[in-house]
Amino acid sequence: MAVPQTKSGLCQVVGKGGVGESGATALVTHTVTGKSEIVMVVRNVGSSLCPNTGAIAMLIVNGVPAAHGNITAAKTSIQASAKPGDQVIALVHAIPLFNGIMCIRLGELDFTLEQCDLE
């Protein structure tokens, strides 16, 4: 699915996804554009996940894991550097927290994949 690219400051949204009720795992791919090294960011942009569920993210650059982390909390993110032409994959997965909380609805965590200039 083609995602309209939107720019805000030094970052440009190049992909969007969600995990939770839409599915346990989401994968977004992007080929880096530009003329110099950049930073790729996976950012939690909103969540209604039940408190018994979290989300982890991984950035993979040219088939090699480059960054990973917990993006459950609002506005959290992970980032990795990439160069023009690099193939980037953002992989986000919903995980159970085993904290004894019971929910009727799972909810959804929405995320973006952003390409950010270093300048």
Image (cartoon, rainbow, N blue to C red):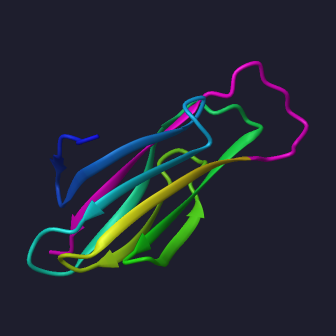
Residue at position x 17%, y 46% in the image: 5
Residue 50 vertical position relative to residue 30 in the rendered view, above or below: above
Q: Is residue 50 above or below residue 40?
A: above
For the residue pair 8 and 52, the one nearer the viewer reads as 52
For this rendering, which residue is in front, 104 or 1?
1
Residue 102 location in percent, x, y?
85, 27
Tell me the magenta residue range.
96-119
The residue closer to the viewer here, 100 or 35, is 35
Position of 46 relative to 77 (above/below): above
Quadrant of the image for the N terminus? Answer: top left
**Quarter of the picture holding the C terminus:** bottom left
Q: Residue at x 34, y 68 (%)?
A: 88
Drawn side of residue 13 relative to residue 35, left or right: right
User: Which image quadrant for residue 104?
Assistant: top right
Residue 117 left/right relative to 1: left
Q: Is residue 117 magenta?
A: yes
